[in-house]
Amino acid sequence: MSHLTVRSPAKLNLFLKVHGRRPDGYHELRTLFERIDLCDELIFQPEASGRIRISCDDPQVPTGRKNLVYQVAEFLQRMTKSPQGIHIRINKRIPVAAGLAGGSSNAAGAIEGLNTFWQLGMSAEQKTEIGARIGSDINFFLKDTSWALGKGRGEQIHPLDMREKLWHVLVVPRVKMYSGEVFTALQAAPLKTEAGRADLKLTKEKDNANILIHSILQKNITRAQALIWNDLEPAILRVRPSLKNVKESLLKAGIAPVTFSGSGPSVFGCVVAEQQAKRLANVLRKRYSRVFAVRTL
Ligand code: C5P
């Protein structure tokens, strides 16, 4: 095979609840993952030197051992005791360290791509085991699904059989966030309560993702958009207080409610149709340079 191209999409967390800190230091999560049509591209080519070479058109992306794609390739090269080298070119469109899991998605793409390119014949279980070892969000991208519930530290994935697609407006402010920093701040920041959200008052916490899923399945977009939630929000705002202004810009443009994806700084809300998403994205582009109208993939 001379080369192979793999598409590597981003995700949003439409819903994210933290159920406390575990003895291993990670936080126990319940989250609703959504694949979106903002994608990177990975191109696999043989590398005659026998080495692993990563290149990327975005200079912010590390190309050495810090890159999860490198870690996957190194792990698979060792596991298979293969003398084959690989050059993986990453064409980046997903903003880095933004809560959109671009790095994890690239790692999942590397697992799939190398499995094909090196003809490794790995089972789904083997791929999942490698994914969980390398990062919390990777396993979502190893499933062929638009929607999934994530449990544990986010690596336990339960795909949802939903064909529905939603439109979103997504703003990615130019600040980098690292999950570790946000989870540390969570220890100090109280969790936001759901008091005041009348539709949720009588509902047990653990069922809220189910109400959101039910609303999406019923194509009740107005209800679904009102139910997006992220427990990490107070911690994100504690780490970067200026992000409150970004949230307010979206609210002022008429997108409500809005929240962060993952550990931020990406801010998003749901809108009912493509035209509205594109119009509102254009309004926000007057103020922010990284604004996307995105859809479930
Ligand atoms: O697994 P990943 O490398 O994405 O996680 C980065 C950091 O985020 C972890 O080292 C941990 O501090 C924190 N984290 C956490 N609970 C999770 C996921 C991540 O505390 N569920």
Image (cartoon, helix red, strand yellow):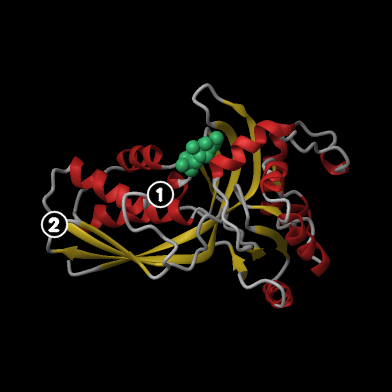
Residue 273 found in image quarter? bottom right
Q: Which mark is residue 290?
A: none
Q: Residues within 10 Å of mark 1 (few under 14, many from 20)?
A: some
Q: Amino acid at mark 1?
A: Leu
Residue 210 screen position, x and y as percent? 68, 41
Q: Amino acid at mark 2?
A: Gly
Instruction: Using residue 141 as the reference point, say whether residue 123 is left or right of it.
Output: left
Q: Residue at x 40, y 56 (%)?
A: 106
Instruction: Using residue 172 as the reference point, say whether residue 257 is left or right of it.
Output: right
Q: Residues within 10 Å of mark 2 (few under 14, many from 20)?
A: some
Q: Element at badge 2?
A: loop
Residue 29 screen position, x and y as percent? 59, 35
Q: Residue at x 83, y 66 (%)?
A: 252
Instruction: Using residue 265 as the reference point, say whether residue 131 is left or right of it.
Output: left
Q: Residue at x 40, y 49 (%)?
A: 142
Give the CA distance from mark 1 to mark 2. Answer: 26 Å
Q: Which residue is mark 1?
A: 142
Q: Element at badge 1?
A: helix
Inspect this view and state whether residue 153 appears. Answer: yes
Residue 277 screen position, x and y as percent? 69, 71
Residue 95 screen position, x and y as percent? 52, 63
Which image quarter holds the N terminus?
A: bottom left
Q: Which mark is residue 50?
A: 2
Q: Residue at x 70, y 35 (%)?
A: 207
Furthest residue in direction top, as rendered = 23
Residue 250 found in image quarter? bottom right
Relative depth, front residue between 178 and 279: 178
